Image: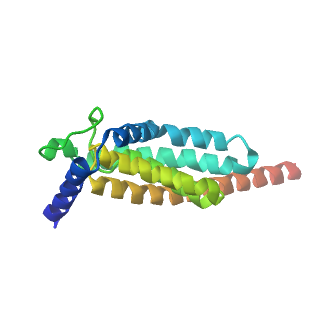
Amino acid sequence: MLEQLMDLDSGFLMYIQEFMRNDAATRTFRGITTLGNAGAVWIAISLLLLVPKKTRRIGCMGLLALVLSLLFNNMLLKHLIARSRPYDCIRGLIPLITPPTDYSFPSGHTAASFAVGVLLFRKLPKRYGIPALVLAALIGFSRLYLGVHYPSDVLAGALLGTGISYAAEVFWLAAEEIVKKHRFCKKRETAHE
């Protein structure tokens, strides 16, 4: 079963390399993947959402989702699973960017993108949420196109990122509730003095 998955992963990457790569697409996907470097575009969007009071909570959840994704995916899972990059294992696969030096599974770019992209899709009007989700998917695909991740890395990153988007919301709302209760208790203590 695992061998069949590896064959599918490898075959898909080689298909992209042989039949989809061209100069214009390479320039485009290099640019798209750069947006996901260190979660840069998602950090910027989350910070912008902190400015208007109406979207401040969403911005906070977005930043929390990025932190959770970094901790869970990049610092824990990548090291536990320790999967080699596809260009190290698939004969003839040529990466189109400087080869990353960390492990492959899951795709950190994809996980961070879906952690915030799915959150924005769920919480913002669709005219903003749909482009966020499309950008997340494009960043994930860029990792395949450029030859630096297996399809299963990207799929896992998308699923984990989606789960993290929900977890970030739950954690943020729980934290807000704790703060509200603490303030209420402080007010009651002050009133009794």
Q: What residue is drawn where x is 71% and y is 40%?
A: 51
Position in image of residue 93 (x %, y %): 18, 44
Q: Can the viewer see residue 72 in this picture?
A: no
Task: Establish if 163 lies above or below 143.
Answer: below
3 relative to 164 in the view: left or right: left
Residue 48 visible in the shown view: yes
- Vertical relation: 107 (above or below) 40: below
Res. 168 image quadrant: bottom right
Q: Residue at x 39, y 50 (%)?
A: 140
The image position of residue 21, as x and y in percent, is: 28, 45
Quadrant of the image containing the N terminus: bottom left
Give coordinates of residue 148: x percent, y percent.
27, 43
Residue 18 picture location, percent across and down: 21, 49
Q: Which residue is the extreme one toward the bottom?
A: 1
Location of residue 180 by image quarter: bottom right
For the view shown, which residue lies furthest in the left direction?
91
Q: Is residue 170 left or right of residue 87?
A: right
Front residue of 50 and 64: 50
- Counting every numbered tag in the picture gives 0
For this rendering, which residue is in front, 2 or 164? Answer: 2
Q: Spot the residue most to the top.
A: 98
Which residue is located at x 75 percent, y 46 percent? Answer: 53
Q: How is the image coloured?
A: rainbow
- Residue drawn at x 13%, y 62% is 3
